[in-house]
Amino acid sequence: MINHIPSDGKQVIFPGASLRYFDSFFSKNEAEIFFNLLVKQIKWQQDPITIFGKTYLQPRLTALYANNSIPYSYSGIKMYPKKMTPLLVEIQNRIQKVSDSKFTTVLLNQYRNGKDSNGWHADNEKELGENPVIASVSFGAERFFHLKHRNKKDLRMKIPLTSGSLLFMEGETQKYWLHQIAKTSRKVGPRINLTFRKII
């Protein structure tokens, strides 16, 4: 179990993974303002998802925005993007100042409470290309971000994603690692997560 990674944006290399984490990339005041605006401005949806032959509503709200019209598919769901809003462009421009990647698309997730979650997965869809860079921004309640190596069971980590934080998953992370936001019995408030990516 890996218990700590730096919170100042320094690159950390693990077997098959490269991470960078900023725990206060956006100020507390900015994070609160952005959270409230995103709740109101984003056109949220709750899509059905089929798991082992049974169909459920996803345990979170989602939305897809982009500067192009290329759809994004995952877990049997195909999403068509809406046009980037000025707020999303502002957030994207901020994170691109600390990344060599040029993002086209943002997938947003709203976790309304501790019952909302996102199961183990990798962002390895073919539209993302080989070794995609994923930039994950969090606003609202803190939730733990779990990662585990696909093959080495002793390689796991848990990162508390604070409001205003920014996490980059780079290199071969999506090839060798899975990640999730697990359900929690703790009483937690709502959280919005934005994952910027390049869809080709």
Image (tube, rainbow, N blue to C red):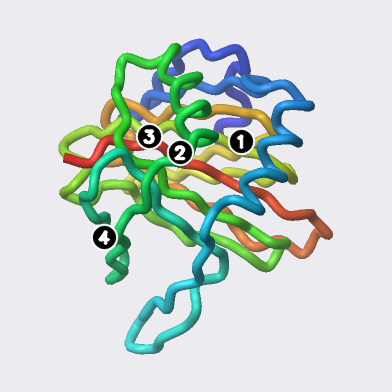
- Residue depicted at x 78% and y 26%: 29
Q: Which residue extends farthest right?
A: 187
Dot 2 and dot 3 residues touching (CB under 8 Å): no
Q: Nearer the viewer, mark 4 or mark 1?
A: 4
Q: Nearer the viewer, mark 2 or mark 3?
A: 3
- Measuring from the top left, give residue 131's x and y in whole percent: 22, 33
Nearest to N terminus: mark 2 or mark 3: 3
The quarter holding residue 17 reads top left
Q: Say which mark, if any, is on residue 134.
A: 3
The one of 122 and 135 positioned closer to us in this rendering: 135
Tell me: 182 left or right of 131. Answer: right
- Rounded to the nearest angstrom, the CA distance separating label 3 from label 4 is 16 Å
Look at mark 2 in the image and give the residue it sits on. Answer: 155
- The amino acid pointed to by label 2 is Leu
CA gap between label 4 and label 1 equals: 27 Å
Q: What secondary structure is found at the residue carrying circle 3?
A: strand
Spatial CA distance of label 2 from label 1 is: 14 Å
Q: Position of residue 53 (x, y in %)?
A: 33, 88
Q: Quadrant of the C terminus?
A: top left
**Which picture quadrant has residue 128?**
top left
- For disc 1, the marked residue is 159
Q: Quadrant of the N terminus?
A: top right
Query: In the rendered structure, which disc, 3 or 4, sits on the residue that comes first in sequence?
Result: 4
Which numbered tag is attached to residue 73? 4
Q: Secondary structure at mark 4?
A: strand
Give the x, y percent position of residue 134. 38, 34
The numbered mark at residue 177 is: none
Q: Nearer the viewer, mark 2 or mark 1?
A: 1
Q: Is residue 17 above or below residue 111?
A: above
